[in-house]
Image (tube, coloured by chain):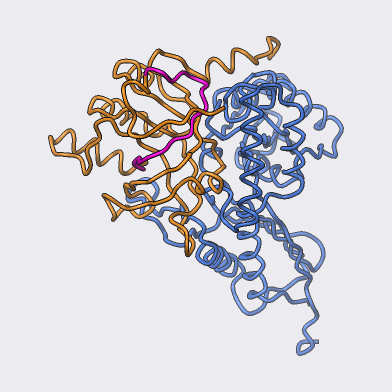
Chain colours: A orange, B blue
Amino acid sequence: MPIKVNLPLTEKTLSELRSGDNVLLNGSLYVARDAAHKRMVEAIERGEPLPFDIKGQTLYYMGPSPAPPGRPIGSAGPTTSARMDIYTPRLLAAGLKGMIGKGIRSEEVKDAIKKYGAIYLAAVGGAGALISKSIIKADVVAYADLGPEAVLRLEVKDFPATVINDIYGGDLYAEGKVKYRRKKIG
Amino acid sequence: MREIKAGTVTEAVAKLFKQANYELGEDVLNAIKKARREEESPPGREVIDTILKNAEIASSERIPLCQDCGTAVVFLELGQDAHIAGGDLYQAVNEGVRQAYDEGYLRKSMVARPFSDRTNTGDNTPAVIHTDIVPGDRLKISVLPKGGGAENMAKMGMLLPSAGRQGVVELVVNTVEEAWSKPCPPVIVGVGIGGTAEKAASMAKHALLRKVGEPSPDAETADLEREILEKVNNLGIGPMGYGGRVTALAVHAESFPAHITALPVAVNLQCHSARHGEIILQGIVNANKG
């Protein structure tokens, strides 16, 4: 059974989650992808405040399709997290605690996840229609000029995700591959 | 001379892109259901269940299967006896893309000046169009909205002829292994072997149009596909990289003669949301022109 998790994440929740856990996220999170990450890290480097308080927050790497009439958002699945890797350690240092995306992270990001006690979750890529059903509300909160790459604040109800990297160094991608790999490849 | 109206092309392209973004084809659904039966890993099975549920929701609620509605890749097979009337063929295709992405609430993901400004073109054009001239008086249009995550994992190698079949297998398996969880597995692996660098790349993409799991008509190529599929599925990557037996749904390879010095190989990965569709437009005799 999936574990219900409230957002923003608490230290207690972070300490309880392990790689491989299925969770249903409830509460608020922020959406940011490539262009927004670049701007946020540039703001940090200039000593400027971020457009929202990132301490303890969770970021979802996503760029939705346009919302059809009567819906808060269009298809809304995760994008490839690796493109955010060069920016992520700076945001973790600034207090970011959770990230949702898809696919492997760099060694630098995995080290920073452990160092700052954060968590990386994956949502199922290509399941944007299903995931959109768990998003109740979506508001643009910053960088509106970036269009589909603007920073959004989402209210989610039972948003399905899986813990990939936990605060203890657990890594579902590495563990899963070892478990199911058959020796003879070449 | 038989005519196909440019407006008919636009309508067909618009319909195909909308349809492809909302609904997986029977071939894809069957391949995913087969993977569900074969997958041993519990997280892998859960991912496949999610994929199937997503397909139901997308289809019944007319919402894109994936927020990445892709680069609009279009393959045209134009009969040499057909005439496109009332407009420019490529403009007609692009107009169809524009209409589909606008009316269908599909995400527009194309940016102009990719190495500098990266400004969104606003309507998901231009399409990437490949054209073959073939006998006959028909126009076959195949569309493939191609997501960025999987396309970014494409790879090519100009192998030495001495590398042979084993070299091809290794390049393809290594490409899938390095891509790991990023291209949204279970993937379909498109492979182009031979020709020149650009010929191999285009065959690797074209191979993705084939019905999922249908073997190559050439026995030796089909055998190569089987060998690569087995090795890829021994990698342990599994659905979405959570670990499992089904890393690829199929391997589709195409081959073409190559220069005596060369063994070009290209790999193009297709995510599990393998959206594609096709239509054949029949040219009609224009009475006015006889």
- In which quarter of the view is residue B257 placed? top right
- In which quarter of the view is residue B220 placed? top right
Q: Is residue A186 visible?
A: no
Q: Residue at x 61, y 52 (%)?
A: B58
Image coordinates for residue B40, horizontal then vertical, percent: 71, 22
Q: Which of B179 and B206 lies nearest the eye of the viewer?
A: B179
Judge whether A95 appears above or below B94 on screen.
Answer: above
Q: Which of B70 and A64 lies nearest the eye of the viewer?
A: A64
Q: Residue at x 37, y 45 (%)?
A: B115
Q: Which of B75 and A17 lies nearest the eye of the viewer?
A: A17
Image coordinates for residue B66, horizontal then vertical, percent: 55, 47
Q: The C terminus of chain A appears in which quarter of the rendering?
A: top right
Which residues are drawn in magenta?
Answer: A15-31
Count of marks placed on residues: 0
Q: Is residue B203 visible?
A: yes
Q: Tell whether B153 sits left or right of B40.
A: left
Image coordinates for residue B248, horizontal then vertical, percent: 68, 30
Farthest residue to the top: give it: A183
Judge whether A62 appears above or below B42 on screen.
Answer: below
Q: Tell whether A83 sits left or right of A45.
A: right
- In which quarter of the view is residue B239 placed? top right
Look at the image and say whether residue B174 sits in the magenta stretch. no
